[in-house]
Amino acid sequence: MASVEVKKTFEGKSTSDLYDAGLKALPKAGFELWKQRPLAYLVMSKRVENGNQIDCNFMVHMGFPVNVSVTLGCDALGEDDLRPWADKVFAAVQEVL
């Protein structure tokens, strides 16, 4: 199973701002929300691409500045196939912020 994790820092945004942005951004990026864990600032989602399920975890990490990690995994796809999906998620986050 290939997986990729991408982290980005967001100056001036709170954990709640980014968690709420993730809830809106993931569907914009084509992912179906699967589980939400507000106390952990975690959103789990998935999508099917060419018959392959891609799992995506969006997690907001407390600290200063706040950062977000997007972790994608798929049994049939490689890291090079998954990385553009992380870019799409972060582009959608920027749109909704």
Image: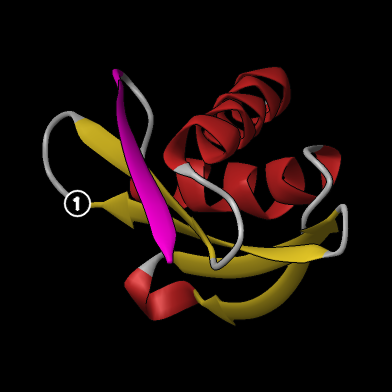
Question: Relative to residue 7, is residue 74 drawn left or right?
Answer: right
Element under label 1? loop
Residue occupying the point 49% across, 30% down? 80
**Which amino acid, by three-letter code, is at mark 1?**
Met
Q: Is residue 44 magenta?
A: no
Q: Which residue is mark 1?
A: 62
The answer to which of 31 and 41 lies nearer the viewer is 31
- Position above or below: 78 against 73: above
> Residue 64's quadrant in the figure?
top left
Residue occupying the point 50% across, 45% down? 78
Residue occupying the point 42% across, 56% down? 2
Bin the neighbour count of mark 1 within 10 Å (Cα to Cα): few under 14, some 14-19, many 20 and up.
some
Q: Position of residue 59 (x, y in %)?
A: 38, 57
Residue occupying the point 66% across, 67% down? 45
Location of the C terminus (image quadrant):
top right
> Which span of residues is magenta-colored?
1-11
Question: Relative to residue 46, is residue 65 drawn left or right?
Answer: left
Location of the N terminus (image quadrant):
bottom left
Q: Is residue 6 magenta?
A: yes
Q: Position of residue 20 (x, y in %)?
A: 60, 51
- Position above or below: 74 against 71: below
